[in-house]
């Protein structure tokens, strides 16, 4: 859990999972993470190698140095038995559902209720229009991704984004009902 209360993606476990099928070097790990696991992410090599150093320090990975002709030697990392146990334990443990209660739209609505010169329903209309526009964009992107045969992680992440926006739109509709009832009472 990050200090902000949000749950971070477990990059270290992703690395362990990628190494589960066999040894890889840092460039391969970066490429596989970006191409097959989280396509919308740009990793820097510093993050990859810092994580590998920590995993090695903890005894979860080890490396061999492989010499190359006409190139610098490279480190190839492999999962240790303890690393495999850690990966299996992580896989067997349910993920923390992100229920971060801090939300800018909610904050705007609560402030709009308090401010005499602001119509909370108008603020809500602006938020709903923006949500619908974004939902339309992502729905089209998801359809294109499916039609274009994009990798499964891309399609699934777009689907997750669409479903989150659909749920957010339902919440906005509920806000509309509650705030109109409040205004009438």
Image (tube, rainbow, N blue to C red):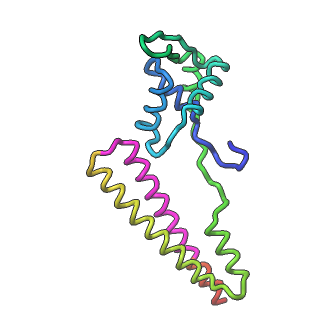
Q: Where is residue 67? Give x, y as percent.
A: 47, 9
Quadrant of the rendering where the N terminus is positioned: top right
Look at the image and tell me whether residue 60 can be seen: yes
Q: Which residue lies at the image location 50% right of the left edge and 63% below the top edge?
A: 167
Front-most of residues 152 and 177? 152
Q: Say above or below: 147 vs 135.
A: above
Quadrant of the rendering where the C terminus is positioned: bottom right
Q: Of helix, strand and loop, which mostly describes the magenta segment?
A: helix
Q: Where is residue 71? Give x, y as percent.
A: 45, 16
Q: Which residue lies at the image location 67% right of the left edge and 69% below the top edge?
A: 107
Q: Say above or below: 24 vs 37.
A: above
Magenta span contains residue 172? yes
Front-most of residues 43 and 1? 43
Number of numbered discs on residues: 0
Q: Is residue 27 left or right of residue 175?
A: left
For the magenta stretch, what is the residue range? 150-175
Front-most of residues 98 and 128? 128
Q: Is residue 112 left or right of residue 139?
A: right
């Amino acid at each position: 859990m990050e200090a902000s209360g949000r749950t971070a993606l477990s990059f270290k476990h992703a690395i362990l999972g990628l190494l589960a099928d066999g040894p890889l070097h840092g460039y391969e790990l970066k490429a596989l993470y970006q191409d097959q696991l989280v396509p919308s992410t740009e990793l820097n090599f510093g993050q990859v190698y810092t994580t590998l150093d920590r995993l090695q320090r903890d005894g979860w990975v080890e490396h061999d140095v492989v010499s190359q002709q006409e190139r610098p030697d490279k480190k190839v990392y492999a999962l240790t038995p303890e690393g495999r146990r850690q990966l299996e334990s992580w896989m067997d443990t349910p993920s923390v559902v992100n229920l971060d209660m801090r939300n800018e739209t909610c904050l705007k609505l609560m402030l709009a209720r308090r401010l005499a010169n602001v119509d909370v329903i108008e603020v809500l209309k602006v938020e709903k229009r923006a949500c619908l526009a974004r939902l339309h964009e992502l729905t089209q992107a998801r359809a294109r991704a499916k039609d274009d045969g994009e990798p499964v992680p891309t399609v699934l992440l777009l689907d997750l984004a669409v479903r989150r926006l659909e749920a957010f739109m339902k919440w906005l509709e509920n806000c509309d009902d509650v705030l109109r009832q409040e205004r009438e009472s």
